Amino acid sequence: MNNEIAPVLDMLEELKQECKVISKAQEELRITLAEQLSCPRADSIKTQETVQIHLSKETQAKIKGL
């Protein structure tokens, strides 16, 4: 029984860690977008770079795989 549960627990832990990474990325994006909205002339390239960093192909693949 324990041999059957261990892989599931491992997958749940991995998902938990991925969720933490996604949550952190979302918070950073919210902050960046709020900064841009509060200063309309803010550098839009910064926002674009932030989005691209957090939504890299690897991250997108992980999200699609969930």
Image (cartoon, rainbow, N blue to C red):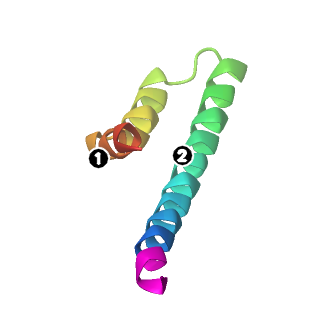
The residue under label 1 is 58
Q: Looking at the picture, does residue 40 appear above or below residue 30? A: above
**What's drawn in magenta, residue-wise?**
1-6
Tell me the amino acid under the disc marked 1: Glu
Q: Which of the numbered marks, if any, corresponds to residue 6? A: none
| Residue sitting at x 67%, y 19% | 37
Q: Which of the numbered marks, if any, corresponds to residue 25? A: 2
Which circle's residue, 2 or 1, is located before the other in the chain?
2
**Mark 2 or mark 1: which is in front?**
1
Q: Position of residue 32 (x, y in %)?
A: 60, 34
| Residue sitting at x 48%, y 75% | 5
Tell me the amino acid under the disc marked 2: Ala
27 or 37, which lies in front? Answer: 27
Residue 38 counted in the magenta span: no
Count of marks placed on residues:
2
Q: Looking at the picture, does residue 11 appear above or below residue 45? A: below
| Residue sitting at x 49%, y 58% | 15
Q: Secondary structure at mark 1?
A: helix
45 or 30, which lies in front? Answer: 30
